[in-house]
Structures are given as C-alpha cells and as structure tokens.
Amino acid sequence: MSPQIIRRRAGSHDIRRAGEQTVHLLESGFTFRTMSDRLQAGAKAMRQGIETGKPLIPTVGIENREDQNAIIAKLLVYIEEAAAASRNALQPTTRARLVAAARTGKTIVMIRAVSLLGLRTVILAPSTTIVEKTVAEFRAKLPGVPVTL
C-alpha cells in the first residue's frame, strides 16, 4: 500500500493567543500571527526548500525515496490549500493524516515535512512505544530543534 494523505476538515476551533507567549525555534517571528499566515509562510518555505533542495531546518542522514518525495509534494499542495481556505473563509485550518503500511518511511516523511515547513508541529501516535521511537528519530535527524513529549 503506497502512502496517502487523507484530508480532514476539522470542526470549529478557537484560535487564541493564550499559550503563545514563548517564541519557539520553529516559529521565530510567528508569535501572535494568524494560523493562515503561519501556514502560508510555512508553505512558501516548504516550496523553496523543495525547489532548492535546502530545507529551512537542516536534517541529518535523510535521503528520500521517490515515493516519499511524491508524498511531500502532495503535502505541500495540501498545506497551500489549507492556508488559502483558512484565509478566504476565515475558518481554522484543516488537519492531515499520513496513512501507510509499517516500515514505509512515515517518520522520515514527517521529519522532512517539518524541516521544510519550519513550523511547530503536533504528531499523534497510537502507542507510547511509537511515540518514543518517533521522538528519538526526530531528535537524531533534526539536531538543535526542541522535540518534546
């Protein structure tokens, strides 16, 4: 089964400034900006990183396979659409979920997307073991970027 991005339209969310007092490494300059502004800037950085081969955040030891490059390209289109929808409809952003068989490179795709986007990202996993493995992989591949549980 090849990886695919499933689009989800979220219900209404209250986007407030609470909890956004600290400027994080991945969002320097984005504190108190709207989600559509953040997504638009992230999509721009992602597109530039894809075109130049230089992500916003350098990664260590990652070489994407062709199928992973295709997923990252689809993810970019999705993020650009989410930014436009959020901006045009004044609605909160949508979510994406990456679904693929075991050992097909989902973590690498996520790391690459985060390195290209340059935005704070929340990743959910179904078990503590997978969370710990994912955190370890992110820390190894994105040195200097704060990764927390």
Image (tube, rainbow, N blue to C red):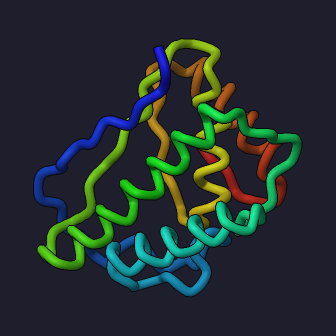
Q: Quadrant of residue 82?
A: bottom left
- The residue positioned 45% from the left and 49% from the top of the image is 75
Q: Nearer the viewer, residue 22 or 112?
A: 112
* Rendered view: 132 above or below 35: above
Please say if 141 is above or below 84. Answer: above
Image position, residue 30 (x, y; %): 50, 82
Q: Is residue 42 left or right of residue 53?
A: left
Residue drawn at (18%, 50%), measured in percent from left and top? 10
Task: Tell me which residue sits at (21%, 68%) in the image.
Answer: 85
Quarter of the picture containing the C terminus is: top right
Residue drawn at (62%, 42%) of the image = 69
Is residue 131 placed above or below 75 in the rendered structure?
A: above
Residue 105 vs residue 15, the one in the foreground: 105
Left or right placement of residue 128 versus residue 112 in this view? left
**Horizontal and vertical percent for residue 2?**
49, 21
Question: Measured from the top left, where is residue 133 in percent x and y?
Answer: 68, 26
Viewer-side residue, 137 vs 69? 69
Find residue 56 and report its horizontal and vertical position in percent: 70, 68
